[in-house]
Amino acid sequence: MTDRYDVIVLGVGGMGSATVAHLAARGVDVLGLERYDVPHGYGSSHGITRIFRLAYYEHPAYVPLLRRADELWSELEAAHDRRLLYRTGSIDAGPRGDPLVEGSSRSCEDHDLDHEVLSSATLSDRYPGYRLPTDYEAVYQPDGGFLVPEECIVAHVDRAHRHGATVRARERVVDWQPTDDDGVRVETDHRAYEADELVVTAGAWAAEFIDELEGLAVPERQVLAWLQPEEPAAFDPEAFPVWNLQVPEGRFYGFPVHGVPGFKFGRYNHREEIVDPDAFEREPTQADERLLREFAEQYFPAGAGPTMRLKTCLFTNTPDDHFVIDTLPAHPQVSVAAGFSGHGFKFASVVGEIMADLALEGETDHEIGMFALDRF
């Protein structure tokens, strides 16, 4: 026996859970398949807090998607019994004239976002947890904050369930094939399923299922630290906006205390370790901790107390650090969202809407041209 669905979604993490929810809400008979638990801590959509920001130095074209994501997170939270998005404001900081600061300011100006440009001294006076070099400046945008990723996934799957979706965890997809009727057949370690459409939102495992992503969606080991603040009040959400910071040691990002009794932060691309998502060092090491602690001691000394927690996760990077959101040229019944390069979770709510559009219509009103596969 083979079960038949309208759409199968491969991977029910941040992007997949949102996709299943949007499809189910449109009355689609949808199946979500997840190899681990829902939610789980093996991929990219975990870690207690994830940054949400509208000031987007990566490219101003992201801002319209972020505004829609913001609306959708608010709608999802209103129907859920727990909070999903906490507003703290966001800071993008670095040496005066740095591309991070300039790009953040440009995105605010291009899209008429409320913002302030602060000197390092003004930043520290207003938010005492920050102690940046005197020649640094920061863009403050009041709408930023953080999402709680595990709860966001729960909220999306709850919504999907309420609309009749089927989600199967602990069921690993082995392979998929196109069928003669222009649908798909998906084989798992349990059984086979067929559908008219397939959506692949498999995170670090996406290239295992989409040949076109080979070398374009590359998994990387990432490590986060939570340190006990020496001055706890300075790292409360009310006193400590989420942040991105460019320093000579690299680009770092961080959060106020929430969920763990420590101030959370990490370095983008950490130690630049390309990995097999099924076989890498998941346990953080002393070298990981040392890299992160040395940064905190220099730039956030009041937050550099004893270690509370270290945690690995996975980035999936593209060559230009922009996403891949597209249908497959040879198989238009298959769409993919991948390569979120360490900055994608905040978009999950709108990516779910986009993937539902692609699965049902083959196109979307959202501007996603910059995420096309053929750009490579």
Image: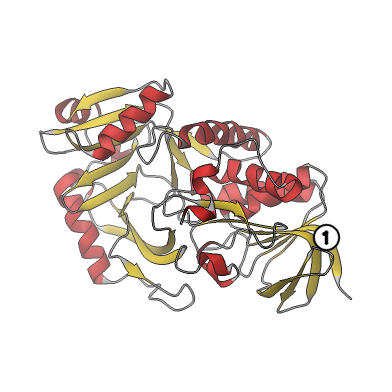
Q: Is residue 201 visible?
A: yes
> Is 294 rendered above or below residue 192?
above
Image location (x, y in percent) of residue 221:
38, 66
- In the image, taking residue 188 as reference, residue 231 lies left or right, namely left
Q: Which residue in the structure is indicated by mark 1?
A: 5
Residue at horizontal 41%, vertical 53%? 342
* Residue in the foreground of this view, choosing between 373 and 224: 373
Quadrant assignment, res 328 = bottom right
The amino acid sitting under disc 1 is: Tyr
Q: Residues within 10 Å of mark 1 (few under 14, many from 20)?
A: some
Residue at horizontal 32%, vertical 40%? 243
The residue most toward the right is 1
Tell me the element at label 1.
Answer: strand
Image location (x, y in percent) of residue 364:
66, 40
Q: How many numbered markers are drawn?
A: 1
- In the image, taking residue 300 as reference, residue 19 lies left or right, namely right
- In the image, taking residue 3 as reference, residue 244 lies left or right, namely left
The residue most toward the left is 134
> Is 172 rendered above or below residue 242?
below
Q: Is residue 158 visible?
A: no
